[in-house]
Image (spheres, helix red, strand yellow):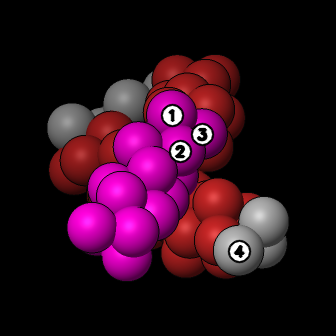
Amino acid sequence: MRWLPLLIYVLAAPTLAGSIMIALLTMEAANDTLITGTLAGFVLALPVAWLISRSIRNAIRA
């Protein structure tokens, strides 16, 4: 199950980054803000993927 965090990150990162990008596009933000927000979405997906994979592992063990 070592691949689980990577799999969750691959699914969560584009979702978070895309959601932030759509929100910034709706607010008509500048291009540098769009890039920064999208990169922040990819970075925020790291702890999210770790927490979700930890929860799944704990649920499987219990």
Kindly report the secondary structure that dominates the magenta region of the rendered protein.
Answer: helix
Q: Look at the numbered discs 2 and 3 and tell me whether their residues touch, using CB distance below 8 Å.
A: yes
Q: Which disc, if any, is residue 50?
A: 2
Q: Amino acid at mark 1?
A: Pro
Q: CA distance from mark 4 to mark 1?
A: 17 Å
Residue 56 highlighted magenta (yes or no): yes
- 53 or 32, which lies in front? 53
- Which mark is nearer the camera, 4 or 3? 4
With respect to residue 29, does 28 lie above or below?
below
- Which mark is nearer the camera, 4 or 2? 4
Q: CA distance from mark 4 to mark 2?
A: 13 Å
- Residue position for label 4: 1
Residue 58 falls in which quadrant of the image? bottom left
Q: Pick whichever of labels 4 and 3 is earlier in the sequence.
A: 4
Q: Look at the numbered discs 1 and 3 and tell me whether their residues touch, using CB distance below 8 Å.
A: yes
Is residue 16 toward the left or the right of residue 3 in the image? left
- 30 or 34, which lies in front? 34
Residue 2 highlighted magenta (yes or no): no
Q: How far from the left and from the top, in percent, is residue 11?
A: 55, 75
Q: Look at the numbered discs 1 and 2 and tell me whether their residues touch, using CB distance below 8 Å.
A: yes
The residue drawn where x is 38% and y is 30% is 29
Q: Which disc, if any, is residue 46?
A: 3
Q: Which residues are magenta?
A: 46-62
